[in-house]
Amino acid sequence: MSSDISGTDTPNSVSVPDKPALEGLEEALTARWRSEGIYKFDQNTTREQVFSIDTPPPTASGSLHVGHIFSYTQTDVLARYQRMNGKNVFYPMGWDDNGLPTERRVQNFYGVRCEPSKPYDPTYEPPAQPAKNQRDWDVISRQNFIELCERLSAEDEKVFEHLFTTLGLSVDWDITYRTIDDHSRATSQRAFLRDFQAGNAYLSEAPTLWDVTFRTAVAQAELEDREVAGAYYRYAFTAEDGEKVFIETTRPELLAACAALVANPDDDRYKHLFGKTVTSPLFEVPVTVYPHPLAKADKGSGIAMVCTFGDLTDVTWWRELQLPTRAIIGRDGRVSADTPEWITTEAGREAYANVAGKTAFSAKEAVVSMLTERELLDGEPKKIMHAVNFYEKGDKPLEVVTSRQWYIRNGGLDEARRNTMISRGREIEFHPSFMRSRYENWVAGLNGDWLVSRQRFFGVPIPVWYALDEQGEPRYDAPIVPTEDMLPVDPAAQPAPGFDESQRGVPNGFMGDPDVLDTWATSSLTPQIVGKWGVDEDYFSKVFPFDMRPQGHDIIRTWLFATAVRADSLQNAAPWKHAAISGWILDPDRKKMSKSKGNVVVPNEILDEFGSDAVRYWAASAKLGADTAYEVAQMKIGRRLAIKLLNASKFALNLGATEANIITDDAAVVTNALDRSLLVRLAEVIEQSTRAFEQFDYARALDITESFFWSFTDDYVELIKDRAYGARGETEQASVLATLATTLDAVLRLLAPFQPFATEEVWGWWRAGSIHRASWPSAASFANAVSDADTRVLTDVALALGGLRKAKSEAKVKQRTEVTSATVNAPSEQIERIKLGLGDLLAAGNAKELAFAASESELSISDVVLAEQETPTA
């Protein structure tokens, strides 16, 4: 646990370098912090002492960008505050090397393709140079492919760790995990089995969003709407009495899959058709006309063609109207080659032959061509732009196909569970608070349970086998599951319990479920994975529920919600107490930075150019939830602050301040009004900064502290040099040295979360141990003693000094030129405050005599007579 060990075995001496510099601090201090275990979590603890962080595991497939630097710094600032505030901080790091991004990177990096039917080659090594043409890539087994994924991920993670340590993340690097290692696979499979046993995970054959490029099912949370060009095609169905019923559709290629027509119940144009049968053009299939409130009377012709399945609305109509399933688009994105049994006429079968086996795009062209040739198309197509569902990583519109998939209940089909998940969200304190609405809006808009099975190679295998009957058909109604002590398992490589490998795929034998779990199904368990749930329950109880989940606002609907779903079903609790939501990094055109857009900044470059403390300053200047522009100017300010901290600290310490001067329990030594003015302001800064941190508003804490620091260096330090050197006696010197030491000690602690390298460097000049194991500053030792002081004393004296210096500048003389006499014009109250610091003002301004004149206007200096002049200046 955190404790203030800063003064242990420390002589009251100061050792300040002649030329302090930021260069080289990251490497030297990072190595020291790790060797000394400065950020190590103490397992000998109680839950009340712990502040646990559910750290986002970055995707270990490629490179980090400046957005990672931004958000991870904000997390680290909060972690460092909690550690200094006495908490035993549990701050792990994970690597998300599971799933499609890793697969794609491995394919391109090594020039390989996975073929699950290919046997494993234990001696396989990828080519030194991947073939440029994908057709020439090596075709390797699933297990060989997984091994390459693990190899490349491990190399990427070394680079990431170096970057994060350079940035100064106070992570305990002894607590790391990978989302695809044995521990994570076992945890993910254990959670799946627990959900299956509780009825929360289930297998179902149902309409599924499908990406034809990646050949995998897609969950609602992975959808992305994109505006694409399309057209409305108008053609008619024919009623039994010959009435033409015109529909308008953007997907004429699905005409053969039509299962019904629907119109709004209140639409008078179609009320007479409800319950009656109409026949489709070309394919001559009779379908029924139904009323349904989702049909929009003002869209198109007001009556819609329901196909199984054109989109998710079709799925809703199919389910609620109990329509027949007439799927024609397969997993490959092509129209089925076999003529469907519901097309019974010769003309209909002949029309279907023209689309069989074609892609959806080619089938659309064929259907439109047939409609045109037979003069069934009413008018020219109306060109439109409309939103179409895409897989967020895909390039082609999604299809809705019927397939057997695994689901986890999340409230999408169950109002009571949906309300439970909304309640769970209200147990979490969101920062900023308005982000909760994004969570609740997502939950309220769910239209199905969470589809968690994926048709990929690299992932956590679904831990299920199926017995095969006499005909070799799988018995999906009776899955075979492992016991938890067998985990992790790979049903594609291990036989089912009670069987041997020779019985795989044969009648009365078994088959393994070929799918893997959605990456979010494992990432949603980061608290359980890193907390050792199911492995060390005592350890888990010390960190769960976690105190904080930091993450981006764009994955509230995925990672945050999915984690809440799993914690609800597995622990009957919310997974964390706080959700700290970071914003995006925007480029100069105010667009989100992303690798896909090619507008990212490589973090190594800015860290090399400005230093870690400068980059951290920029990141910490942005509030949680705020989208922030990438600003080099802010980094320059941050670097200037860090350099000023070194130089000002050197100056203050060389004035004579030591650790022995720090006020610990008696502030009576502080007798000077200027010193008391600074300390009462310092007390306010500590209180305000602490309050801001408690509200997760680190940006305000930085702003408050930085403003005070510049006043301290530019105003106070400039005013007290004479006293610090003893020119006005030991009592005055003791007062100023106590103030200097106390203020520097507090400022270093206040800035430590933001600029850990510069503050640690200065700390080492005069204190023992690490500042990052020191306690958060407190004003308890001096606040009461100076409570009657006036913060405006320092402000007003500094204004007067500024006026004297301005007069010298305007007279074009050196600042050390003596002021023989001058008049301070100011309101009487301000004059009285200035007189309290008159001795310091005269010394700092090298003024021999100052007169005062009451005035209603702002402070000004007049009648300035300089030693080198015979007449006063205005």
Image (cartoon, grey):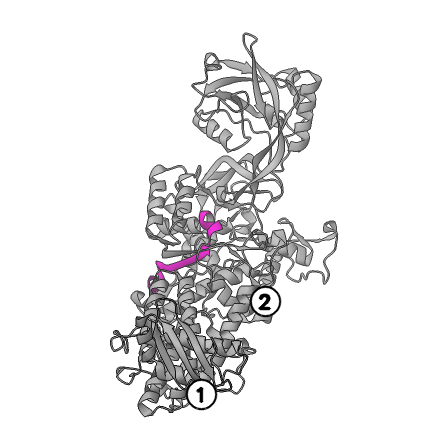
- Residue lying farthest to the front in this orientation: 871
- Of residue 416 and residue 380, the one placed in the foreground of this image is 380
- For the question of whether residue 562 can be seen, the reply is yes
Q: Which amino acid, mark 1?
A: Asn
Q: Answer yes or no: do the residues labelled 1 and 2 have beta carbons within 8 Å?
A: no
- Of residue 438 and residue 749, the one placed in the foreground of this image is 749
Q: Quadrant of the N terminus?
A: bottom left
Magenta range: 537-557
- Of residue 723 and residue 249, the one placed in the foreground of this image is 723
- Give the x, y percent position of residue 77: 43, 66
Q: Which amino acid, mark 2?
A: Ile
- The residue positioned 74% from the left and 56% from the top of the image is 131
- Of residue 24 and residue 745, the one placed in the foreground of this image is 745
Q: Which one is earlier in the sequence, the residue at label 1 or at label 2?
A: 2
Q: Which mark identifies residue 606?
A: 2
Residue at mark 1: 654
- Whether 786 is among the magenta residues is no
State whether residue 149 is above or below residue 282. Answer: below
State whether residue 477 is above or below residue 248. Answer: below
